[in-house]
């Protein structure tokens, strides 16, 4: 009997525990329902019981971030990335810069032909705006980075020569046969001969770049040094905007790329000149219109006041004037009369009479500060 009582007591305890667990679950469900109801009441609308919130799919996320290349071109970013990069200045706002680079391409084709004694074709691939830090991270290594200084502008630029062009120039200058691709040996640093040959080519390019800017503004681009590691080629802060022009150099079956980077800080001294739509454009000045305006100004009618005297009074005294009140002027018949146009005193003269009218004979013409200079 004792065992039966213990079994019954144990069963009763288990049932009580189950009932307690059910009560706890019910209580938690009730609390959750109340919380959802409060949230829905505060927000004005909430998720329906048993419903689900809508989740964006991958295409919608790409469109929001501006990564959808199908809807827009690769160069036309939209969405969040467009907002982030909106601080970048587009090179298209500098029309003369593209003219300068076109002139550079033509001059480089001739200079590199004379330099290599080979058939060289130089073409301009793209001109883009980019942040300096992003450009350093995008340089394909190995490459040679040339730092040069714009003497008159007192700032720096960067010229990057990729590995393919380095080996092609070395092969051409050292007598490599045509029809064979330049041999590339990876995993070793550039030799002194390779660096010297590339430095000579870079000097030719910098001279052409100086000549390309000459019609716009005389400037001398001076070679500073060659670097292999992009970390040692920092000429601006990573967040600073810059313009990158990518040039393609083809020597029959060989060639490579040259990338020219100019920070906007470097171009700042000639920004007004780069904003021109054509060479020699005058901002806000038109000689024909200036001549026409000058001719019309000489025929403009202006009012001239002859002022005998003027003085200051209190407002209370002026309000007390009556018919018959007299004003005493601090002048005599021989006092000078001032001729004034608006607030500007033009001349002074003596008052007299001519043909029954009161006249003023000009004795002194006032000279303003601007006219005296």
Image: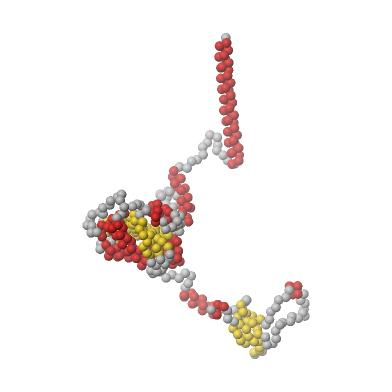
Say whether residue 275 is visible.
no
Give the image location of residue 55, x and y in percent: 48, 41
- Residue 356, located in which quarter of the rendered image? bottom right
Left or right of 188, for residue 18? right
Quick one: which residue is furthest to the front in this view? 192
**Relative image position of residue 291 (x, y in whole percent):** 49, 77
Q: Is residue 316 above or below residue 193?
A: below
Q: Quadrant of residue 216?
A: bottom left
Viewer-proximal residue, 301 or 126? 126
Q: Which residue is rendered at x = 74% and y = 81% of the image?
A: 328
Residue 373 seen: yes
Q: Quadrant location of residue 371?
A: bottom right
Image location (x, y in percent) of residue 202? 33, 61
Q: Residue at x 42, y 60 (%)?
A: 263
**Image color mode:** secondary structure
* Residue at 42 percent of width and 54 percent of height: 133
Point out residue 331 in the picture as x, y percentages from the top left corner: 70, 84
In the picture, the quarter occupied by the N terminus is top right
The residue located at (36%, 67%) in the rendering is 211
- With respect to residue 187, does 176 lie above or below? below
Q: How many numbered callouts?
A: 0
Q: Is residue 248 left or right of residue 344?
A: left
Which residue lies most toward the bottom here? Answer: 355
Q: Residue furthest top?
A: 1
């Amino acid at each position: 009997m004792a065992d039966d009582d213990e079994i019954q007591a144990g069963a009763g305890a288990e049932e009580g525990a189950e009932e307690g667990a059910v009560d706890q679950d019910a209580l938690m469900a009730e609390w959750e329902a109340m919380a959802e109801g409060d949230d829905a009441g505060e927000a004005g609308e909430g998720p329906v019981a048993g419903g689900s919130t809508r989740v964006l799919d991958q295409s919608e996320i790409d469109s929001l971030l501006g990564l959808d290349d199908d809807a827009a071109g690769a160069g036309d970013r939209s969405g969040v990335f467009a907002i982030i990069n909106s601080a970048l200045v587009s090179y298209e706002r500098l029309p003369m810069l593209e003219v300068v680079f076109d002139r550079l391409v033509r001059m480089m084709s001739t200079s590199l032909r004379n330099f290599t004694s080979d058939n060289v074709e130089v073409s301009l691939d793209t001109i883009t705006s980019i942040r300096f830090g992003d450009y350093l991270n995008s340089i394909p290594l190995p490459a040679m980075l040339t730092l040069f200084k714009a003497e008159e502008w007192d700032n720096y630029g960067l010229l990057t020569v990729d590995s393919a062009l380095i080996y092609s120039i070395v092969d051409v200058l050292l007598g490599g046969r045509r029809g064979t691709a330049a041999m590339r040996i990876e995993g070793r640093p550039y030799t002194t001969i390779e660096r010297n040959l590339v430095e000579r080519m870079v000097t030719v390019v910098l001279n052409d770049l100086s000549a390309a800017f000459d019609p716009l503004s005389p400037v001398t681009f001076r070679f500073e040094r060659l670097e292999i590691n992009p970390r040692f080629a920092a000429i601006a802060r990573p967040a600073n905007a810059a313009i990158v022009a990518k040039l393609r150099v083809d020597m029959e079956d060989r060639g490579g790329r040259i990338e020219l980077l100019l920070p906007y800080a470097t171009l700042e001294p000639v920004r007004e000149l780069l904003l021109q739509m054509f060479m020699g454009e005058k901002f806000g000045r038109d000689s024909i219109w200036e001549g026409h305006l000058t001719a019309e100004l000489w025929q403009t009618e202006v009012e001239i006041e002859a002022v005998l005297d003027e003085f200051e009074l209190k407002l209370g005294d002026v309000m007390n004037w009556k018919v018959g009140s007299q004003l005493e002027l601090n002048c005599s018949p021989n006092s000078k009369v001032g001729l004034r146009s608006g607030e500007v005193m033009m001349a002074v003269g003596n008052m007299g009479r001519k043909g029954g009218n009161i006249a003023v004979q000009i004795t002194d013409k006032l000279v303003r500060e601007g006219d005296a200079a």
